[in-house]
Amino acid sequence: MIRLEGIDVRLGQFALRDVSFEIPPAGYGLLIGPTGSGKTSVLEAIAGHSPLGRGRILLHGKDVTAVPPEHRGVGVVYQQNNLFPHLSVAENIRYGLAHGDLSVADQKARVGELADSLGLGHILERGVANLSGGEAQRVGLARALAPRPSVLLLDEPFASLDPATRFALRQQLLDLHRREGVTTLQVTHDFQEALQLGNLVAVMSEGRIVQHGRPEEVFRHPNSSFVARFIGAANVIEGIVTRVGDAEGADRQFAARFSAGSVTLDVIADREGLLNAVIHPEDIVLNHRPTGGSARNQLPATVTAVELAGPVTYIHLDAGYPLRAAVTSASAESMGLAPGVSLFATVKATAIRLV
Amino acid sequence: MPKLPLTHGPRMTMPFRPPDRSHLILAFLGAILVAFVAGPLLYLLLRAEPGSLRQAFTDRELMASISLTLLAATAATLLGALLGVPLAYLLAGRPFPGRTLIQGLVELPIVIPHPVAGIALLLFLGRHSAVGGALGKIGLEFVSHVPGIVAAMLFVSVPILVSGSRVAFAGIDPHLARAARSLGDSPGRCFRRVTLPLASRGILAAVSLAWARAVSEFGAIVILTYNPKVTSVLIFDRFTSFGLEAAIVPAIVLLLIALAMFGLIRFLQPSIPQ
C-alpha cells in the first residue's frame, strides 16, 4: 500500500503542494499529467530522494517519511540512463541482492528467474552499453524487482520505446505485477496506458493532484476542462450556461441553454455562468438526415477529417465549433464518411457534462 | 548476394570529399599554429646528438634532479588527490552556501603568474611567517627544502586536479546514485560501488595532468627552493651559467618525460569526440 498524506515538497522554484492519494496493497496506480506537473517529484519523494516540507508517506502502513531510501524497500525504474554502465546485465540485476542474506546460489537463481520472465537469459553476460531501449528497460525492471521490493515506482518506463516493444513490455510488466504482487505506481503522460494498466489514476497539474479515481471514472467524468483536455477523452467547449427551467430533484438540477459562439445546446445544469461543456466522442451520433426522438441537440455539421484508429474511427467535424465524434470503422465506411460530407451530429442533453 | 553495408554500429565512416576553398584557408591558418607548437619541440629533439642521452645517465646532478622532480611531483599530486578529490565531490554535488566562492578560489592559481605564486608562498611559508614559523618548529622547513618544492607544485596543480575531478563526478547521471540507494546502498556504499568507479577514469586523467603540471613547474619553485634543484631549475641554471649547449640535454630529458606523461593522459581521457 502507498499512502500520501498532504505532502509538500519544495524543489527550487517548483513545489508539490498537498499531494494525497492511496494505492491499495498490490494495486497498480498511475500518475499522469503534462511535463513539469510534478509527477516525477512525487516518485522521488516516495523513494526518499526529496525531503518533505509537510505531510507523511506511509508504505504498507508504516510511516517512512524519515526513513532513508535504502531502508524503504522501494524499487525504482527510471525512463533512461537507468543502468550502471560499468556492470554487466547480470551484475546490474544482482546489484540489490548484495545486501540481503541470500547465498550466491540463491542470488543467481533469482537473477535467472527474472531473466527468464523478461527474456533476458541470452544477454546476461553482456555489458549494458549496446542494449536496445527495450532490453535496457527490461534489465532496469529486473534489477528493481530482484530484491523483492514492497513498492515499485516506474518513471515513464515505456516513453522512449517503439510501439511494438512498448506493447510487449507492458504485457510482461502486467504479468510480473500479478505474480510478484508488488504495489506499483507508474508515471505516464499517456492516458491510454492508464486505462490499460491501472486501477487508480491521479491527474497532476502544477504540483497538485487535480483529480484521482478509477481510470474509467476519470475518463467518463473529468472534473475540469484541464483534465478533460489532458486525457484527450472529450470535446471541451467553453461557453455560457443560462437557466430555462425550474430546479428539480435532490441535486437541484435544471434545464439550461449552453451557448458558445454560434453553437447552442440544451443541457442539464446545476449552476449558471461561464462553464465548459464536456462531450465524449462516443456520445455523438452521426446521421445523414435529421432524426426525431428524445435527443434535443441536433447540429448540422461537415466532416473535416477522418482519423482511423483501429476498430474505432474518429470523425472530425465542423459544427460551428470543432467536434470529434467516434464511430466504429465499419460504420464510417458504410456511411461513406469523408472530408466534405454534410451530416447531422446529435448529442443528448444528459450526455453533456458541465465542468 | 546482397551487399553488406560499408558501415555498421554507431561508428560512421564519413565519405571523403575534396575540401572546399574556405576549409583550405582554415587548414592553412591551423597549420601555422600546429607548426609553431610542434616545430620547436621537434627541433629540440633533433638536437640530441648520438651518445648525448647516454651521457645524460652519467650526469649525476641531472639524474638527482630528475629523481627529485618525479618524487616531489608524486608527493604533491598524492597530497592534492587526498585533499582535492573529496572537495571535487562536494563541489559537484548539491549547491551549498559559498560553493561558487570555493570553486573560484581553487581555480585561482591558473591566472596567478607563477613567480607571484612563489613570492606569496615564500611569505606564507617562510620562517618569519606565523604558519611557516609554526611548521618550522615541528621540523617542516619549506624555503630551500624539498617540502617547498612540493608546496609550489601543489599550489599550481590544484586547479587542474580539483576541476578535472569535479567534472568527472558531475558527469555521472544522478539517477544512478539514486537507483543504487533505492537498491539498498548507504551513501558511502553507493559512493564506493557506483560513483567512484564511474568517475575513476576522469579522476585518473585529472591526477595525471596535475602530476605533469607539477613536473613542468619552474616559476614558483625557483623562488621558493632554488636548491636542491628540480630539473626545470637545473635547465635554467645550466643555461645561465654555461650557455645554451649545456641546457639542451636536460631539456630533452624533461621533454621526453612530459611526452610520455602526455601519451598516458590522452589514453586515460574518458572520450575525445571524433
Image (spheres, coloured by chain):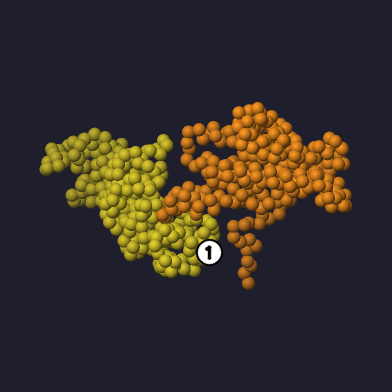
Quarter location, residue B129: top right
- Frontmost residue, B192 versus A86: B192
Residue at 44% of width from left, 60% of height from top? Answer: A98
Whether residue B131 can be seen here: yes
From the image, tell me which residue sits under label 1: A126
Residue B44's spot in the image, x, y percent? 83, 45
User: Extreme left residue here?
Assistant: A249
What colour is chain B? orange
Residue A4's spot in the image, x, y percent? 29, 46
Residue A15's spot in the image, x, y percent? 37, 38
What colour is chain A? yellow
Q: Vertical placement of B190 versus A225: above or below?
A: below
Residue at 51% of width from left, 41% of height from top? Answer: B90
Element assignment for label 1: loop
Residue at 24% of width from left, 45% of height from top? Answer: A352
- Frontmost residue, B179 versus A115: B179
Question: Which part of the image, by quadrant, shows the N terminus of chain A?
Answer: bottom left
Residue at 64% of width from left, 39% of height from top? Answer: B154
